[in-house]
Amino acid sequence: MRQPRPRPAGDGRPAADRPVAVTAEAAAPPDAATRAAVLVEALPYIREFRGRIVVVKYGGNAIAGADPARALASFAADVVLLHAVGIRPVVVHGGGPQIGELMGRLGLVPEFRDGLRVTDAETLDVARMVLVGKVNRDIVTAVNAHGHLAVGLSGEDAGLLTASPRDPALGFVGDVGSVNPELLRRLLAEDLIPVVATIGSDGQGQAYNINADTAAGAVAEAVAAAKLVYLTDVEGIRAERDDPASLIHRTTPDGLDALVRSGAVAGGMIPKVASCSRAVRNGVPAAHVLDGRTDHALLLELFTDKGVGTMVALP
């Protein structure tokens, strides 16, 4: 298995599991020399990942940030830039806040267990409307503002995501039974960017709402991705749940397991952490968790030595 490209010594990204304080400093606009230095820094990463697949999970929380239109435009520009330099992005998205918003307007009360939405038939209809009909369209439109590149998909299309019920208590919440990567490979071969809404179905055509974090990890494994990236509404994985200064810049699957056992990871972060661990253990060289509300966070994480979030890789 190819290992992730090591960050240069002294680059500011600490050893595994070491929390580092996060500070915000005002910066003047970069001059020409600084811009050139940024490009030079990015070059080895571009060379390494050119032709490789990067699966990006764009979370509903990132879409629903303080300025969702700006966050989505920044994300779309990042995805198009990856495509332009020869990297092959696949976008998998959630839409939890948007589902919750529509449920509220309809007088429905959401219920969660271990970060997963309890989904009865009515909630499933809402989830399909929001994920396939709204969020997916918004992302495709934002990417296609830069050219005719993105193709919107549901996991129900061509058997992309087959699902089975996770737990009767959760209703129509599904686990990924299998991923059919052929559809994604065909689109990538045509130089297109797949954008996947995570509604899957079983052999009888029953639809299931699949947690987007879990689905993204399964897709990354199926397409042999070089990287799996989660964009959400926090800056990464923290050693202390409520302390932004405890951001962990690099860790391992075993380190993530320890964080879950300690209670430092809870709620909606649990599926992300579990999917990162599983994907890395099953052959994806690196997984990342970062704040999708930060302008160009995807580029900063993939193309700079320091990065801006948490990277998970084998020791």
Image (spheres, rainbow, N blue to C red):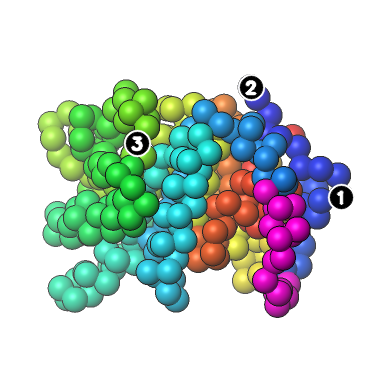
- The tag on residue 141 is none
In the rendered image, residue 313, in percent from the top left (x then y), is placed at: 66, 38
- The span shown in magenta is 23-39
Dot placed on the residue nearer the N-terminal end, 1 or 3:
1
- Quadrant of the rendered structure where residue 201 is? top left
Identify the secondary structure beneath mark 1. loop
Report if the CB atoms under discs 2 and 3 are less than 8 Å apart: no
Q: What's the amino acid at mark 3?
A: Leu
Q: What's the amino acid at mark 1?
A: Gly
Q: What's the amino acid at mark 2?
A: Met
In the rendered image, residue 122, in percent from the top left (x then y), is placed at: 14, 59
Residue under numbered circle 1: 10
Dot placed on the residue nearer the N-terminal end, 2 or 3:
2
- The tag on residue 1 is 2
- The tag on residue 192 is 3
The residue drawn where x is 59% and y is 33% is 49
In the rendered image, residue 9, in percent from the top left (x then y), is placed at: 86, 44
The residue drawn where x is 19% and y is 55% is 133
In the rendered image, residue 34, in percent from the top left (x then y), is placed at: 74, 59
Q: Nearer the viewer, residue 107 or 97?
A: 97
The residue drawn where x is 22% and y is 51% is 132
How many numbered dots are placed on residues in this image? 3
In-image side of 154 versus 15 (left or right): left
- Quadrant of the rendered structure where residue 97 is? bottom left
Q: Nearer the viewer, residue 133 or 175?
A: 133
